[in-house]
Image (tube, grey):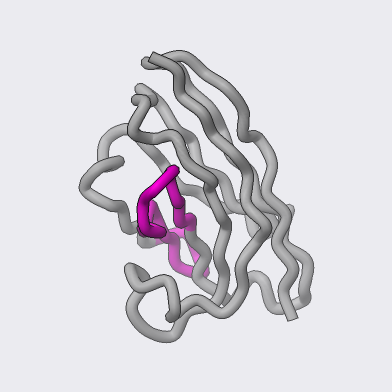
């Protein structure tokens, strides 16, 4: 079993940065890929980024590529999402996910979800 708790959300101006963290509990954390999804107001949930169990492979949505960076520290059971050059369209609830044996880009392929943290980007 894995439990995920996100932190680091908040209000930021256009062009600013935020760093989200996701603390995981569970003995098998190091074996799982991890990722982030987001859901903006009136929008469908969308894939943001994912990272494999070792951190050696990362995957990004085209909309965040070059601005966001996903990383993980298995010793701290934590995955991060560094978000730079934020735009109003990045406003959303960001949710951490864990364990996926299929398509990283599909939300229903992820087994564990955090509660989410709100990110608001003002123009």
Residue 40 covered by magenta stretch = yes
89 up-or-down from 39: above or below: above
State left or right for residue 26 relative to residue 104. right
Residue 89 in magenta? no
Judged left or right of residue 93, residue 75 is right
Q: Residue at x 73, y 55 (%)?
A: 5
In the image as oriented, which residue stretches furthest toward the bottom? 101
Residue at 42% of width from left, 71% of height from top?
107
Q: Is residue 67 above or below residue 103?
A: above
Among the 4 quarters of the image, the one containing residue 88: top left
Residue 46's x, y, as percent? Answer: 36, 57
Viewer-proximal residue among 85 and 27: 85
Which residues are the magenta region?
36-56
The quarter of the rendered structure image containing the N terminus is: bottom right
Q: Going 38% across and 14% down the picture, which residue do you hit? A: 123
Residue 72 placement (x, y as % from top left): 56, 53
Position of 5 relative to 34 (above/below): above
Residue 111 appears left or right of 92? right
In the foreground, 86 or 58: 86
Position of residue 118 measured from the top left corner of the image (x, y, whole percent): 59, 39
């Amino acid at each position: 079993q894995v439990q995920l708790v996100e932190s680091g959300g908040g209000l930021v101006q256009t062009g600013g940065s935020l760093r989200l963290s996701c603390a995981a509990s569970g003995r098998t954390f190091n074996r799982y890929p991890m990722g982030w999804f987001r859901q903006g107001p009136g929008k469908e949930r969308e894939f943001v980024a994912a990272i494999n169990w070792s951190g050696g492979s990362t995957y990004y949505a085209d909309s965040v590529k070059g601005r966001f960076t996903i990383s993980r520290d298995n010793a701290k059971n934590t995955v991060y999402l560094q978000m730079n050059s934020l735009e109003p369209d990045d406003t959303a609830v960001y949710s951490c996910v864990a364990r996926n044996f299929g398509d990283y880009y599909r939300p229903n392929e992820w087994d564990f979800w955090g509660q989410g943290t709100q990110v608001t980007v003002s123009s």
